Amino acid sequence: MARQGNQTPVTRTGSIPPGNTRISKPARSASRPKRPPGRPFKLPRSASASSSRSGRSERPSASPSVAPTPPRRVLSMLEALPRELIEHIFLYSLNLNLPRASPSLAAALSREHIYKLLIILAFWDDPPDTNPGSEAIDRILVPLDYKPLTLDQRAKLQQDVFRCRFCTLDRVREQIPNMMILTIHRHWINAGMVMEPDQQKALERFMERKSDIVHEIQAKGPPIKRLPEMIGNPEMLRRANIPGPHEYELCINPMMLTEIRSKTMGTIVTWPAIQLVHFPPNLLRGGRDGFSPADVEFLEMLRVTSNNTAPPPGSPLSPSTSTRLDRTALHEGVTKAIRTLNFAALETLFKIDELICRFEVYRTEDSVLYMFPSDHYLTVTRLACDPIQNVRLFQTLLRACAESLPVNNQEIRQWTLDIVDLAEKDPVRYGQIGKFARWFSDFYLRLEEQIDWAKEHPTGALFCLGQLDLHDIEGRKYMDDVLGPGQRPPANYLHETSFNARHWWLKRSGPEVPPGFVRSPRRTGA
């Protein structure tokens, strides 16, 4: 038997010598550590997983040019339905969270005709107890299986729509003519009004939006039973029983108001272009940097088209509104408008605030003195800006409510003296604001008397709805001492608006916007 020491070493590349049937193990390298005795320990889970992954990645792929595809997402039963059926389900439920449930539902429902229907449902004043269905109304609202909403349902939907990204100035404005046309169908045409041929043609031309001029449309028709209920006057119930036909008159202010006057009953019923339940708080507050031109345009449009304004001159109607308001949000917006010198936003916010405070239908008092936080005046006096702009801000607040001034305030007195001194040093540049400061210094001494008088006589404030009271001694002094030659005294500012209602009614083949208008993608939702 051969000894182990005489065996021929085996190499990796060499051949085995003939006649050698026994092969010895190769000698261990001196640098290679010897494995400790015993069973090896199990690797940690993370290490084994990583080594397993690395091992798999090092293996050659059977088809290296084809990347592995993720498993296809399985659609739910709702998502797999035809798009038309998904639209019907959505419009029936009016659950605006449905498109947020999945990308496929969002793609099916994010369409312009859906946005149009949601805006109309949210803003068209059509109570459930109105006249029966109409083919014309159903045709305008295709594909909606239309059922009128209650006031609570409309308020909830309107609040949800204002929070959506699609609720932009442009989209809401585009649907206002459609809502007015729906109102005319519902309360005039469906009521069975019979017009002369020329009157019929004039109304049809207006409803086709080829004309913005509508003379008073005369018609005869049956008694409208809902008029006495809407007016709430027992005498109207008796007049409603007068045998027909009754005589009626239709008056339309494009993009603003629809009136039906019953000559037989002596009544006037109005429908604003849109029913605004609440002013959206996020629009009242403004953005992080204040109010853009589109923000102001949106607020003005909502104010005017919802009839939160004064009736036309010569109208027998008094101002009235059912719109609710978050005054805290509004006065946060006032502060932003002051600090950014945004006079347009400031005036619009005060118009909204004063009208709703004075003429809200839910108010129990006959009349109330409109006031706002006196801190706004101090914000103006502390603002570092051009003195002329500073005084203009102060005058804007004064026109809204002079009685909201803080009484016997040292900052107000010092601010007034500074303006007077400035005018004396440079009368050419600051002479006009000096006139105002001298008048104001006298008025401020009698402020407490003015506040007491206004509390007893709310319409006897120095300015009411922006209009100067020329019957008051302070109002006459303001006219004589502050206004320049040929200047008219401030009138009712509810009629002042940048919203060009007639322009937006007409269908044009030319420019889409009036001169000076700034288009912006401002939205109310997040």
Image (cartoon, grey):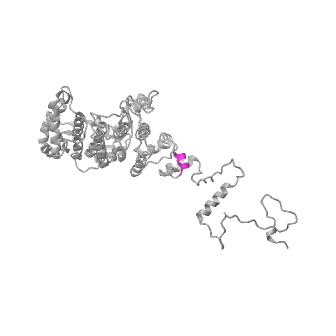
Magenta highlight on residue 104: yes
**Rendering coords of residue 383 (x, y %):** 24, 41
Towards the viewer: 314 or 404? 404
Towards the viewer: 185 or 449? 449
Towards the viewer: 142 or 516? 516
Toward the front, the furthest residue is 6
Q: Quadrant of residue 440?
A: top left
**Rendering coords of residue 113 (x, y %):** 50, 41
Q: Quadrant of residue 494?
A: top left
Which quadrant: the N terminus? bottom right
Toward the right, the furthest residue is 19
Query: Looking at the image, which residue is at 48% across and 46% down?
Result: 146
Magenta highlight on residue 451: no
**Rendering coords of residue 2 (x, y %):** 84, 71
Prevailing secondary structure of the magenta residues: helix
**Rendering coords of residue 515 (x, y %):** 38, 28
Number of numbered discs on residues: 0
Magenta-colored span: 102-109
Residue 478 in view here:
no
Q: Quadrant of residue 410?
A: top left
Query: Looking at the image, which residue is at 31% across and 41% down?
Result: 308
The vertical placement of 343 against 67, above or below, is above
Left or right of 481, for residue 465: right
Residue 97 in view here:
yes
The vertical placement of 33 against 126, above or below, is below
Toward the top, the furthest residue is 486
